[in-house]
Amino acid sequence: MASKAIIQYSSSSSSSHAIITTYDVFVSFRGEDTRNNFTAFLFDALFENGIHAFKDDTHLQKGESIAPELLLAIQESRLFLVVFSKNYASSTWCLRELAHICNCTIEASPSRVLPIFYDVDPSELRKQSGYYGIAFAEHEERFREDKVKMEELQRCREALTQMANLSGWDIRNKSQPAMIKEIVQKINYILGPKFQNLPSGNLVGMESRVEELEKCLALESVTDVRVVGISGMGGIGKTTLALALYEKIAYQYDVHCFVDDVNKIYRHSGSLGVQKQLLDQCLNDKNLEICNVSRGTYLIGTRLRNKRGLIVLDNVSQVEQLHMFTGSRETLLRECLGGGSRIIITSRDEHILRTHGVNHVYRVRPLNQDNAVQLFCNNAFKCDYIMSDYKMLTHDALWHAQGHPLAIKVIGKSLFGVDVSQWEGTLVRLSENKSKNIMDVLRISYDALEEKDKEIFLDIACFSGQHYFEDNVKEILNFRGFNPEFGLQILVDKSLITISYGKIYMHDLLRDLGKCIVREKSPKEPRKWSRLWDCEDLYKFMSSNKEAKNLEAIVVEDEPGMFSETTMRFDALSKIKNLKLLILPRYYEKGLSTIEEEKFSGSLNYLSNELGYLIWHFYPFNFLPKCFQPHNLVELNLSGSNIQHLWDSTQPIPNLRRLNVSDCDNLIEVQDFGEALNLERLDLSGCGRLSRFHPSIGFPRNLTYLNLSDCKSLVELPHFEQALNLEKLNLGGCELLKQLPHPLVV
């Protein structure tokens, strides 16, 4: 007997009322007549087709009055099957059931009642003749002194007459299997798609997605077997979508099953466990014994062959989990099923789906704003609208979730019943400490990565707010010793990032996950982290002035006024021996010329020779450290700084591609770039004291962009003989332009 009610909504879109039902069908029958033959087969067929039927069985204590459990079951059923046999009317229990069914349905919705005339003529009910006449005569003789019972018998007579006039099935002298099939089809038709009957709280934004998925499945084609994959990040709604579609269309298939969490079953029981789940649901044979995978292979190949089936395999994490067969037999389930069959596979890893050869991959996206608000309200307010005084706080809460259904539910439930005055504090804590329930779900995909792919994920999660262009990310990853072409595709396949129009995107919750992972071992000691991205954490590290052994990358977003109210010990950077990436924010408050020296206590006497990217706008020192070796530099950007000299011209800089020292008013000389063989972009714009280039200075052949705009003191152009690929030269704002016959600004 079911214990969980299902909310059945009216098919009319305008209806706002819901009928709480526990059962699809209530079956009333005289057990002694039919329990071990017709009704037994009928219940099996209902179960196989996913129709939840109440069975008035022997466990209910029968007595003079109808049991409360039975009354409740009748009230909470959508349809009623009444199996009229010869001895049905001889049971006062059956007659009371029938009277209560009629009382609940006949006047309001008679179509909910479906009579089956098992071995009696409908006219016997209408006239109360034959076996029914004899039964009523016996009842009246028994209760003739009891006025209440006699009135009850009269109501039963009227109920029988009403039943006889309803459309149903007269199955006398007919094939019972054929009639049972027809009855089940009729019930399925009346019940309609189960999708409409699922709890609405789980289906926000789902109906349109189900329609899109149906198009991918091409359900109208009944000759081919089509396999569709559903991919997306953890908690995005893959399983909910698959289940919604399954509930909607399963009744149309000869066999169907929804194997929940294939990965878990496979880890515990291997392929045999998956086979057992599949066969148990498809065949509904509780006595089926599968002792090994070979036996399972045989049963799938024989019992499901050529049947039109709907198979859903949820949460597949390895290609091997989809191999249902052994030996030289077919390796794919779809090669066994009949035409019109559909297989749906959900996985976080799109590579698995492609390897399996799916016909189409449906990618589940975050909810749009309207759906996100509705789902949040369902969980936070238990209604479909934002309660008064909570509008701004609701949008603050949704900002944390970014359309992620699991996050929306978790956050909403955590705020249910919380006073408006407490919401702000709850949301602040949420921003500082992400929900473990959400992070645990997302982390499954991260834990499945190889070590180098984990590093790529962490780099993007911590830093890509500033470096999200695909080419830039690839260049940095390549410098850090990773394989960006392969690694980025792995992250795409596992639904951890998306790449579109040359940009890399990662969901905010995944960014939060990456940052949580970096911090988890020493949450309050930034110097022990591998990466720094937050201004406050950077200040905490620099203030401690302690050695950092694991720190390889610092990328801090621009923070206006970061240095204006604090004393920053930049000599702490001298204690990071393995630093490869350093990007620090701009100084906005007062401009370079008025920076007080006390803002920059200590001295920068060392920079890691491992540095490949040094981007430090308004660099506060006149020189790079003397011992600094720039041979690993790929990009150097010191725009707006006090720098007077870069490095000794004899030092090799073979990897440098971009150099920006624009607006460096103190820069009076530049070195020979001829040895920077890979230099592509050079920006010297706004260097007001730069007057000439030394005659020995040359430019590499790969240089494509040179910006000398607003170099007002420049009186002589450099030599470009070797810069064969120069495409853009900007001399705007230079006095030198007046001496040229034609402008060279491109």
Image (tube, rainbow, N blue to C red):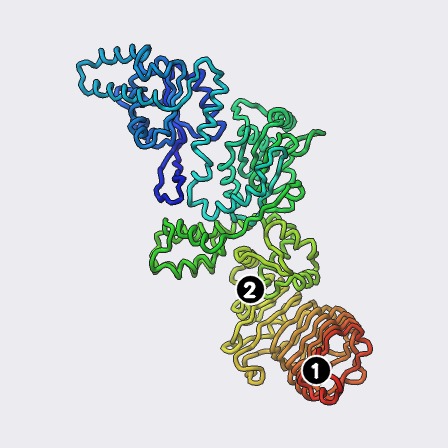
Instruction: Using the rendered view, name the quadrant where residue 69 is placed.
Output: top left
Give the mark, 2 or 1, whose residue is nearer the N terminus.
2
Look at discs 2 and 1 and give the one toward the viewer: 1
Residue occupied by mark 2 = 526
Check disc 2: other Cα within 10 Å, few if <14, some if 14-19, many if 20+. many
Q: Nearer the viewer, residue 505 or 153?
A: 153
Quarter occupied by the N terminus: top left
x, y percent for residue 371: 45, 52
Which amino acid type is marked by label 1?
A: Leu
Residues under numbered marks 2 and 1 in contact, where contact means CB atoms less than 8 Å apart: no
x, y percent for residue 448: 61, 47
As helix, strand or loop, the secondary structure at mark 2 comes to helix
Picture residue at 47% right of the left edge, 48% below the top = 205
Which amino acid type is marked by label 2?
A: Pro
Above or below, 542 relative to 68: below
Q: Nearer the viewer, residue 263 or 714?
A: 714
Residue occupied by mark 1 = 731
